[in-house]
Image: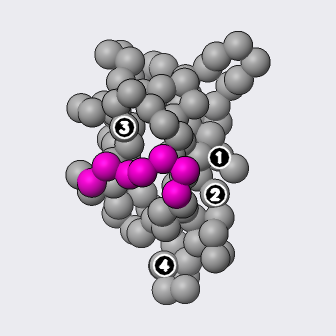
């Protein structure tokens, strides 16, 4: 899995949000990007400020398939990303 969050003792995420999340809205172990059914999916951990796709809060622990241009937000009013993938992956 590809981990998202902020460093902690013995943990360094693949995507470190420390420098861009100045108000600390994201958790240390915020989410993971995994492959499910040959498509990328996000699995969020239980956090104080939540994780959102296109404005909808995601439940912790449940893999959610990602689509092109999904807007992923880590924390309320936190860091936002637009998800991109190849059109070949999207057609599956």
Q: State yes or no: residue 58 in magenta.
A: yes
Where is residue 8? Give x, y as percent: 64, 16
Q: Is residue 33 above or below residue 85?
A: above
Mark sitting on residue 34: 2
Disc 1 crowd, CA 10 A, few/some/many (<14, 14-19, 20+): few
Mark sitting on residue 90: 4
Query: For the residue labelled by badge 4, is the local secondary structure a helix, a strand or a loop?
Result: helix
Alpha-carbon span between mark 4 and mark 1: 19 Å
Query: For the residue labelled by badge 2, is the local secondary structure a helix, a strand or a loop?
Result: strand
* Pointers 1 and 3 in contact (C-beta within 8 Å): no
- For image coordinates 55% across by 50% down, the residue present is 61
* Pointers 4 and 3 in contact (C-beta within 8 Å): no
* Pointers 1 and 2 in contact (C-beta within 8 Å): yes
Q: In the rendered image, which residue does mark 3 sit on?
A: 50
Q: Which comes before the other along the chain, label 4 or label 1?
A: 1
Q: In the rendered image, which residue does mark 1 sit on?
A: 2
Alpha-carbon span between mark 1 and mark 2: 7 Å
Q: Seen in the image, is 84 located left or right of residue 61?
A: left
- For image coordinates 27% across by 33% down, the residue present is 76
Query: For the residue labelled by badge 1, is the local secondary structure a helix, a strand or a loop?
Result: strand
* Pointers 3 and 2 in contact (C-beta within 8 Å): no
């Amino acid at each position: 899995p590809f981990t998202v969050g902020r460093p902690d003792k013995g943990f360094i995420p693949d995507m470190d949000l420390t420098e861009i999340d100045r108000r600390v809205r994201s958790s240390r172990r915020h989410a993971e990007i995994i492959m499910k059914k040959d498509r990328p999916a996000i699995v969020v951990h239980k956090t104080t400020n939540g994780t959102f796709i296109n404005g909808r809060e995601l439940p912790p622990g449940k893999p959610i398939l990602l689509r092109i241009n999904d807007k992923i937000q880590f924390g309320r009013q936190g860091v936002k990303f637009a998800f991109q993938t190849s059109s070949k992956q999207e057609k599956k």
